[in-house]
Image: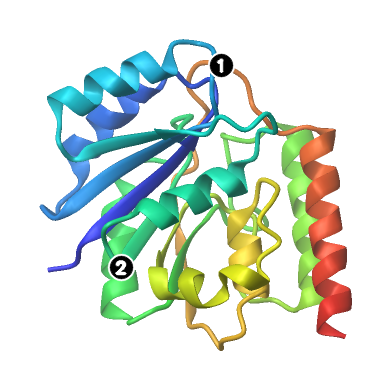
Amino acid sequence: MLNLSIVIPVFRESQNIIKLVEGLTDNININNYEILFIDDDSNDGTEEILKKLNTENSKIKYFIRKEKAKDLSQSCMLGFENSSFKNILVMDGDLQHDPNDINKLIEIYDTQNADIAVGSRNLFNKKNEGLGIIRLTSSKILISIITLLLKKKTNDPMSGFFIFNKKIYESNKNKLLGKGYKILLDLIYNSGENLKIVDVDINFRRRGKGSSKMGFKVIYILVLAIIRNFFTKK
């Protein structure tokens, strides 16, 4: 039976966490799993909620990053370091990733013996209600640039919803940029291995409460990561 560490980086998602946990515990079809919340030192009551959830459910763990700089990739890496199992699933804490899709990701990852199974939003071929027109357009442009400069390895290199083998991180963590908001891009293009990557179409939903963290700073860091990878590969 596949075991799974679910790593969820959060920042000011206190209004979404309880609903997300309910969705996870109601939908996951495996018994051997843990949920690791990595809070980027939110100031909205997130820590108190996580502490309460931890006392109620031993599968739920949490870690607080106290660093001044907020960084999703750093949060994910902290989760990877503290994960108990060799299979790691990353997802967002804003309810845009449907917990019910986890079973589909697990099945395809497991049966196809993949290194990484990417929850693909398939932005070029399907309607995505979870993205506004500006974010959708910018995502398509960035994915096109990534494909052009770094070669296509997945339909959605900017996905925040994927499952992978922990050994990929362990054997390549010194090569990772380790900053920014797209850890999948970092893992895929800075791994020294030939990875078997499979895409799995997901139901990308509208976010729950709160506001998106996507902004010009996030896009700027992402562009720098693409440029870094392009020149490193040359």
Residue 4 got which mark? none
Furthest residue in direction top, as rendered: 44
Q: Coloring scheme of the render? A: rainbow
The answer to which of 24 and 46 lies nearer the viewer is 46
Q: Amino acid at mark 1?
A: Gly
Do the numbered discs 1 and 2 sit on residues whose CB atoms are within 8 Å?
Answer: no
Secondary element type, mark 1: loop
Secondary element type, mark 2: loop
Q: Earlier in the sequence, mark 1 or mark 2?
A: 2
Q: Nearer the viewer, mark 1 or mark 2?
A: 2
Q: At 26% across and 67% down in the image, what residue appears?
A: 107
Choose top left, top right, bottom left or bottom right for residue 186.
bottom right
Q: Quadrant of the N terminus?
A: bottom left
**Residue matched to label 1:** 210
Is 201 left or right of 155, judged from the image as shown?
A: left
**How far across and down, in percent of the image, does residue 41 sit?**
54, 24
Q: Amino acid at mark 2?
A: Lys
**Residue matched to label 2:** 86
* Mark 1 to mark 2 CA distance (whole Å): 32 Å
Residue neighbourhood size for the residue with mark 2, other residues' Cα within 10 Å, grouped as few (<14), some (14–19), many (≥20): some
Residue 138 visible in the snapshot: yes
Q: At 24% across and 36% down in the image, what residue appears?
A: 60
